[in-house]
Each structure stands twice: as structure tokens, then as C-alpha cells.
Amino acid sequence: QVQLVESGGGLVQAGGSLRLSCAASGRTFSSYFMGWFRQAPGKEREFVAEIIWYNSPHYADSVKGRFTISRDNAKNTVYLQMNSLKPEDTAVYYCAAGRTGGGTSNYDYWGQGTQVTVSS
């Protein structure tokens, strides 16, 4: 059974940092796109970042220069380092895995999400 489990969310002040982790189990995802998405209250789920072994990571413009995605294939884990956090980054953050990258419809497996709240 495939599982993606996110951790590391929480409450942080604006300008602070958090590191999210996503531990995958049930299969090896080394050849998959691994992505982070987020969904704020009343808004659609949106792309944040994704990573694949043969290309540079891809980021949404809103987080470029502040967030860094990385992966440890040996641990089947993907990370999202979030710096200089802003109140508008407040959302539930989801980890996902898929054979093709891009939008939410291209991802096959999803975690349950972890809440990130940034206070002003």
C-alpha cells in the first residue's frame, strides 16, 4: 500500500522558516516526480514545487527564491525548506508523487497534508 506522510508543519511568524518532510512507503519513487502543492481556505489547490532526478527543480513564481525542494532517494523522502515565510503562504501543504510532473492532475499519489500557518 502506497503512503505519503507529511510532517513539519506548524505555526511560525512572518519571516520565519519551516522544513516540511514527506516520507513515502509502499514503493520506490526515485524515478517519479515528487511535488509539493498547497491549498488555502476557499482556494483551489496550487502547485508549489516539484523535483525529478534528470532536471532542475521547478517552482511557482510566488515561492521562487524562498523555498527549496530536495529529495533523498535512499530514504524515499522529499523535503521542502521554506524561508522568509509570508502570511499568504498559510495553507495545507500536500506532498504528491507522479510519473509526469506539472499540474495536480498529473500526480497519482497524495499525502494527507500538513498545516502551515504564518502569522503577521
Image: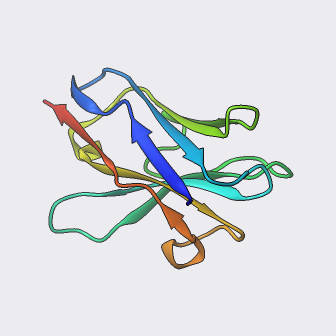
Quarter of the image that includes the C terminus: top left
Q: Is residue 90 visible?
A: yes
Which x, y percent locates residue 45?
A: 35, 67
Which residue does the image show at 66% across and 67% down from the upper left?
Answer: 101
- Say which of 49 and 23 sits in front: 23
In the image, farthest residue toward the front? 1
Does residue 120 appear to the left or right of 104 in the view shown? Answer: left
**Quarter assignment of residue 70:** top right
Colouring: rainbow
Does residue 49 appear to the left or right of 42 in the view shown? Answer: right
Does residue 38 appear to the left or right of 92 in the view shown? Answer: right
Which residue does the image show at 23% across and 68% down from the upper left?
Answer: 43
- Number of numbered discs overlaid on the protein picture: 0
In the image, farthest residue toward the right? 54
- Say which of 97 and 93 sits in front: 97
Which x, y percent locates residue 30?
A: 77, 49
In the image, farthest residue toward the bottom? 105
Which residue does the image show at 56% across and 59% down from the upper left?
Answer: 2
Quarter of the image that includes the N terminus: bottom right
Which x, y percent locates residue 69?
A: 59, 39
Which x, y percent locates residue 51?
A: 68, 50
Which residue does the image show at 57% across and 54% down from the upper left?
Answer: 35
Q: Is residue 59 visible?
A: no
Residue 1 in the image: above or below residue 70: below
